[in-house]
Image: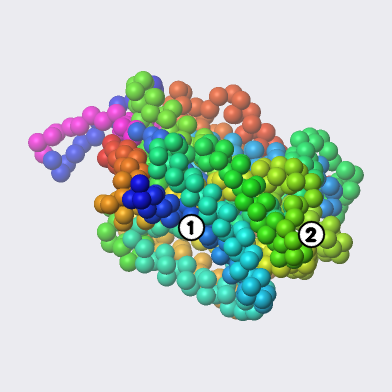
Amino acid sequence: MDVTRKTSEVPEEPTATAVTERVWRAGRLEPMPIRKLPDAPPSLHILGPTVFLVALGVGMGESYMWPRLVLVFGPDIRWLFMVGVTLQAFVLLEMARYAMATGESIFFGAARIFKPLMWFFYVAAILIYMWPGHLSAGAAAFEEVSGIPWQATACVALIFVGVLFSMLSVIYNFLEKLLGLLIGLLVVGTSVIAAIVGSWDDLGNTLSGMFAFGYFPDKALSEAWFPIVVGSIAFAGPSGMQQMWYTLQLRDSGAGMGAHIPKIRGLRAAAEAESMPSRGFMFDTSDPAEMQKWKGWRKWVTFDALLLFWGITMLVTISFTVLAMSAARTNPDVAGLIEGGDREAALKAMSDAFASAGSPILGTLFFGFIALIGLNATLGLFDSFSRGQADMTYYFVPGAKRFSMSRLYAGFLWGVITFGILILLFGPADGPAGILDILAFLSTFAMGAYCVVLLLVNNKLLPKPIRPGPVRNVIIGFGAVFYLGLLFYSLVRFGVVVG
Amino acid sequence: MAVEVKQLAEFSVPAASVGAAAGLIAGGLAAFVGQPFGWAVVTGLGLGLPLMVFGAGYAVLIGFGKVPAGVFAPAAVYWVIGFPLALLVHSVVTAWVVTGSPGLPPEPWKFLAFRALVSMGFAIGFLWMHEQLGRHWWPRILDHNVYARRTVEQYVHLASTFKARKSA
């Protein structure tokens, strides 16, 4: 193992004149001290930080955008979804590699390679995620069920999230439990609804479509549809910067070397927060016992990636696709509305179709689940955004270390909430119309960019024995080409970014 | 024997609750959207009761140590049978209420096969919620319930592994 030795003076303890500490030098920033890798938990335990990724990832892409494409192009278009989600499962595993080996976020890794890379993500996150538009789908579904105007629900939800996260002692533990329960409810409910209204033929078509590799009808290459297809691929599973935030949740859950980093606390308990180390740690990869533990951690995260992330994302999309096909069969108008792209009208028509076809409760239940998906995404998004910005600010904005990480987290949380409420009351929820294209571009560009960053950090900053193999590198490299290629093709060919 | 049954029933509360939740959502929302009270109750019970019974059956298997708590594969195998049957009961009951006489759905094998595939998802959700509810319920009854004590011990063993890695 390429570990160098650094001699550091310890002035507080005059008796110990010099302490030799083994460190791992990674990039240009401070070297990582060598510490013990903790034992991996058995894969038995079904809950893990992947619930955040599932909560964020299962959103409009799964419940609306892909069912829409299936109605327009037929079930065979779903092979693209299969490619998108599988690619994201590999991204998850590679994000976890760096975070578990070092206890650092992927943002810190990017800064070790080249600081401007990290600043790009810092600015992009603010531009993409400060707009409260993502609240609208869930809150609008709630309006259908309850009659309460969606802006009111959205404002109350924003304040509720802020107060809740400020009151908690340790935010991660609570959110993991809450999201676990909500996603459990979502998965149980979605399975039950799909089982009631769907049929064998719908499912057969949907499943066989996932393996129709290469199917791409001419219509999908048109100016009207290509950007929408690209946008849908980017929204298959976690989109934008959600995978990068996952590294922070892994760290806070104590996975791998994250066990050596203190947890973020709510504002009320911020004073109790332990001091944050100025960088991550590395374990001794030349020690076979440590490598054995590392294998245990990789097994643990692979279980999470396959069963929880890939499995649940597939299940929810397949269920919603089956629902859309069943609704379109019951009421042909639904197909027209869904294809037309008016999301609210389409969801309402689907709900009505279920109400008239199956048992009358299904229509309401359908909206209930859209609202639940919105709530999960909102809880996850506010936490993740604040976590990511607090992390980068703490380590890289000069003077920010005066505040604790927990206080910076609270600052970003309340900042985005205040801005969100002002925009909901007075401005365009998705962002000004003039910059919508730029935001969509940034979101997809960030995905291509993080594939490049992953290749760099995992191959340049980690010790050789724990670097990814050639197959993983090729897959992540394909991801970079895939996202950036589709994005720029759409831009050059049609002058439109993504839909 | 009676004590054993009582203990098993008490131990099965979280598993049965997941089925009850599915039934309650169905029945509660039926009432909420203005359906007659009787209809709401029938829908809720038709779905909730069979899922509660199968859920309790799964908990009994855990109680007897036949399947480990919180592991996916046995839960998936269990529900691939239990979930389609529960929905078959729901379908028969619904047909009974609507037409006045109980009847099987058309193409019953296809009906069961489709639900068997969807059951994978239900199994994940069930396992997840079961663990979440159980971790609050079992510690409260473990002083007089041998099944709860055994299961909590499994989880304590797991927690000690977590603790060990925290202090490493």
Residue A224 magenta = no
Number of the label disc, if any, that sits on residue B17:
1
Q: Quadrant of residue B43?
A: bottom right
Which residue type does callout 1 highlight?
Ser
The structure residue drawn at horizontal position 66% and vertical position 43%, both measured from the top left corner, is B116
> A48 or B47, which is in the foreground?
B47
Residue located at (85% from left, 48% from top): A73
Could you tell me residue A128's position as x and y percent?
61, 59
Residue extending farthest right = A218
In front: B92, or A106?
B92
Could you say which quadrant of the image residue A59 lies in?
bottom right
Residue A327 image label: 2
The residue positioned 46% from the left and 58% from the top of the image is A178
Vertical placement of residue A326 versus A454, above or below: below
Is A353 on the left or on the right of A158, as rendered? right
Range of magenta residues = A14-38
Residue at the (27%, 40%) spot, across then down:
B167
**Majority secondary structure of magenta residues:** loop
Count of marks placed on residues: 2
Helix, strand or loop for disc 1:
helix
